[in-house]
Image (cartoon, rainbow, N blue to C red):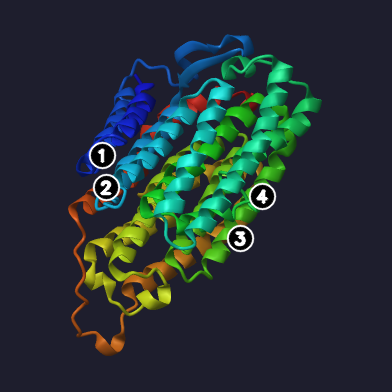
Amino acid sequence: MIAWTIYVTFAGAIVLLVLPRVFARWLALVTAIAGFAIGVATFCQHDVDLAHFRTVVRVPWVPALGMNYHLALDGISLTLVLVTGIAAISAVLFSWDVTDRANEFFFWLLLVVGGSYGVFLSADLFLLFLFYELVIVPKYFLIAIFGSTNKEYGAMKLTLYSFFGGALVFLGIIAIYVTGGSLDLNQLAQFQFTPQLQSWAFPILFLGFAVLAGIWPLHTWAPTGHVAAPTAGSMLLAGIVMKLGAYAGLRVAMNLFPQGFQMWRTAIAVLAVVGIVYAAAVALRQRDLKFVIGYSSVSHMGFVLLGFATANVFGVSGAVLQMFSHGVIGALLFAVAGRMIYRRTRTRELDALSGMNLSRALPFAAFTFVVASAASMGIPGFSGFAAEITILIGAWKSYPLAVWITGAGMVLVAAFTLRALKRSFFDVDLANTAAAPPEMEPITIPEKLGAGLLMFATLAVGLYPKLLLDRIQPAVEAMRFLK
């Protein structure tokens, strides 16, 4: 059943090419809801084995090369399927008034979503790489055609970084296929690659995937791409696309090359900690609200990489939970900045927003940004806290010093988040406190529904993280690099 997330999404994208424009947004919404509903239905099935990467579909594709159309599912991939569905629905709702080339816009959007489903479910290495590269094309056109600030530059930079990472991944796949003689991820997980091969193949493969996860210092495409993208594009980049690299690094590089991972995991921890602190410090100096959130995404993805580097169940499970959490929180932050604020004020500059009294003009937007900011800072009760505390517990067992340094990064996260919140909504002109707030278009119903879905997701997981961790931890325990 879970395989239909891919089929339904791609089918919806194709139908959009011939459907009258007036129905485009409705078809996109129905398609996104259908994909999410399939994920929820699978999540609720108690007889599904989520501890192991079990085959869902397996059909011969190119038998001469050992390629199969092979899909599989475990608790890790199901968690990311769910966040993909949530991000897709909210992205469509926050694009509800797109009228210029609407069919094309939603076509590219659904291709990103469908390709992401494919990555999270692929159990054939070449199929995973195919879906992984497929996402690059639609995200380029989403930014280059429908973006704003330096959109051509942002789209090209993101694409070049993605292709650079993809080239490294392709080299790693060749090494795996020539040595292991298979492309089946479950079979390869049982194959004993030599330590010599793993020592050089792991960093190539992991780094290739980690480029898309925003690893420092190959992270600069992320803030630029976020700022250039339309609101839905930013939401998908933060909510889904950055997770593709992290997931593939875990599923492929770490699980197939466990000895190589052990050789390089300290280096990964160092890069992760530097990324957390550096990106947070840079975010503190930004004047464009989208740049603040863009660097915030890099900092939060550093927690994912730190969780991986711990090589224990707590840290890695927390990293997967952080992928879900940041997917929801990042999408919510970009929705407020790119849609609720920019659409009504035509600016994202904090200096310009200061004194506009937006908390009175846009009270729902202010409330949403307060919730998103609290979740981003890791306040208890939100998914960000549940994910980061789990990662830090795992990190304390492996790298206690990293926890102390990361603590400084978390202070910086709170600093730039509160600064952005105050300057955007609560930096009131004291000389005109009695003045009426400026007249602005009220927040629309689709915007409220999209924000409500994202806020509900971060609160639900924050208040009851066991909901996801019970699915994630057994799948992590079955991973080879922990043995």
Which tag, 4 or 1, sits closer to the chain's start? 1
* Residue 271: mark: 4
Q: Callout 3: few (<14), some (14-19), or many (20+) C-alpha neighbours within 10 Å? A: some
Judging by the rendered image, the residue that carries numbered circle 3 is: 278
Q: Find the distance from the CA under tag 3 to the CA under tag 2.
A: 33 Å
Judging by the rendered image, the residue that carries numbered circle 1 is: 29
Q: Find the distance from the CA under tag 3 to the CA under tag 4.
A: 10 Å
Q: Are marks 1 and 3 in contact (CB under 8 Å)?
A: no
460 vs 276, left or right, is left
Which tag, 2 or 4, sits closer to the chain's start? 2
Q: Secondary structure at mark 2?
A: helix
Q: Secondary structure at mark 1?
A: helix
Residue 343: image quadrant is bottom left
Q: Is residue 353 visible?
A: yes
- Residue 12, percent from left and from top: 31, 31
Q: Secondary structure at mark 3?
A: helix
Judging by the rendered image, the residue that carries numbered circle 2 is: 93
Residue 468 lies, with reference to residue 404, above or below; the image says above
Under mark 1, the amino acid is Leu
Q: Are marks 2 and 1 in contact (CB under 8 Å)?
A: yes
